[in-house]
Image: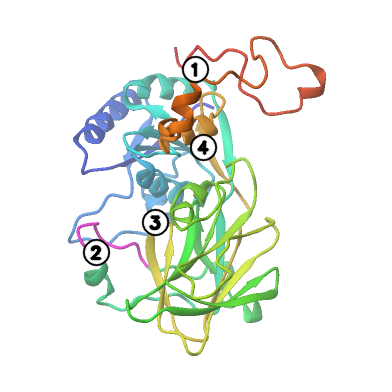
């Protein structure tokens, strides 16, 4: 695709990200492409809604993120609004989302501009709620702790300000997860969980989350949830520290929505979307989480080795058994094309020695 407008999301706290941003701006200037910094905030200024950010940037068709997975999530929030491509430049420590080493950013931009990339689709989550989500005025002061201004509360989509029994459709999408969590340390949330319109169970827990396959390696993983291939489509429900025997994750099909209703005896709860607090629920109120109509389109320069990245990021090579076993041979020889009975499978490419950009 020929790039016409670039939106730049930068981790301003990292000097290497600030330096890489200058490189991206210089590349854009050399190609006659408009480049605008987006999702920029100062301590004295509020953050803006995605539509406002994109309009100010002229609706970019490519969003470049410079940072780790958290910065990528900031870019994904914006890209989901107008179906833009996202290119993640890796400056993080435990990243699963970013694609390109910082030293190769110009080559990656060349590849995107010349159409030598693919777009990997990642499932996202959308939301409805029994009422608009709001935050108390002093909530930002309590939750901030050096993380910058909070995002504004989610609001109803203009085309669905009143949803009746189906709830209000919110202007909110999540690439990783939607979490309903307790507000007070000494009071758990009591929540009725509904899967595909049927009551599954009522939980008393620290939090309850609905994650995507992409988010299965984030908070869901830390809470004991399963690791799921990002190529899959599913909703992963996981309770966090529940006071009940059944503490397992439940994996729902992409067309099976999951609803969380705060029970009358529960304390207050906050709703976080991709780690950002976006609203509060009172007893009797609910949120519904379901697969978004459109996926995120992430730039990929070659086949994604998710399991190799999982092995590296989780340090699975440090296991004593791995050290004792030595270098494992491949299950099948990969120096020749797959035979006909394996041709439909997703296997590593025959050539693994060539980096896609070089």
Return the residue at label 4: 298
The reply to whether discs 1 and 3 touch (Cβ–Cβ < 8 Å) is no
Range of magenta residues? 145-152
Label 1, label 3: how many angstroms apart (C-alpha)? 35 Å
Q: How many angstroms separate mark 1 from mark 4 (CA)? A: 16 Å
Name the residue located 44 percent from the left edge and 75 percent from the top edge.
133
Q: Position of residue 167 (x, y in %)?
A: 60, 76
How packed is label 3: few (under 14 Cα within 10 Å), some, or many (20 or more)?
some
335 horizontally vs 260: left or right: right
Dominant SS in magenta: loop
Q: Nearer the viewer, residue 353 or 144?
A: 353
**Which tag, 2 or 4, sits closer to the chain's start?**
2
Q: Which residue is mark 3?
A: 52
Q: Residue furthest bottom?
A: 264
* Residue under numbered circle 1: 356
Give the percent coordinates (x, y) of residue 235: 61, 57
In the image, 327 versus 238, the foreground residue is 327
Which residue is most to the top?
Answer: 335
Quadrant of the image for the C terminus?
A: top left
Asked if marks 1 and 4 touch (Cβ < 8 Å), the reply is: no
Residue 188: x and y in percent read: 41, 79
């Amino acid at each position: 695709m020929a790039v016409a407008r670039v939106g730049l999301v930068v981790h301003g706290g990292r000097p290497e990200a600030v330096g890489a941003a200058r490189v991206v701006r210089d590349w854009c200037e050399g190609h006659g492409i408009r480049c605008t910094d987006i999702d920029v905030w100062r301590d004295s200024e509020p953050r803006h809604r995605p539509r406002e950010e994109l309009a100010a940037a002229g609706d970019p068709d490519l969003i470049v993120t410079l940072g780790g997975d958290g910065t990528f999530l900031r870019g994904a929030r914006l890209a989901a609004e107008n179906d833009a491509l996202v290119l993640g430049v890796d400056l993080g420590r435990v990243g699963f989302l970013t694609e390109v080493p910082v030293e190769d950013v110009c080559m990656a931009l060349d590849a995107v501009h010349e159409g030598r990339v693919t777009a990997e689709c990642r499932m996202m989550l959308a939301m409805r709620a029994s009422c608009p989500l709001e935050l108390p005025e002093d909530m930002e002061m309590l939750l901030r702790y050096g993380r910058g201004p909070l995002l504004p509360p989610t609001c109803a989509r203009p085309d669905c300000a009143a949803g009746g029994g189906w709830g209000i459709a919110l202007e909110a999408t999540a690439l990783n997860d939607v979490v309903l969590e307790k507000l007070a340390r000494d009071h758990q949330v009591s929540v009725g969980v509904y899967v595909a319109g049927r009551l599954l169970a009522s939980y008393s827990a620290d939090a309850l989350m609905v994650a995507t396959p992409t988010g299965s390696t984030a908070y869901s993983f830390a809470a004991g949830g399963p690791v799921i291939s990002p190529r899959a489509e599913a909703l992963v429900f996981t309770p966090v520290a529940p006071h009940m025997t059944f503490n397992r994750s439940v994996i729902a099909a992409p067309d099976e929505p999951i609803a969380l209703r705060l029970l009358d005896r529960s304390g207050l709860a906050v709703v976080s979307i991709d780690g950002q607090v976006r609203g509060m629920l009172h007893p009797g109120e609910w949120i519904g989480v379901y697969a978004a109509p459109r996926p995120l389109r992430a730039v990929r320069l070659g086949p994604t080795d998710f399991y190799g990245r999982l092995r590296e990021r989780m340090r699975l090579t440090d296991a004593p058994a791995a050290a004792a076993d030595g270098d494992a041979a491949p299950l099948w020889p990969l120096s020749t094309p797959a035979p006909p009975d394996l041709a439909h499978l997703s296997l590593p490419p025959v050539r693994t020695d060539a980096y896609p950009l070089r």
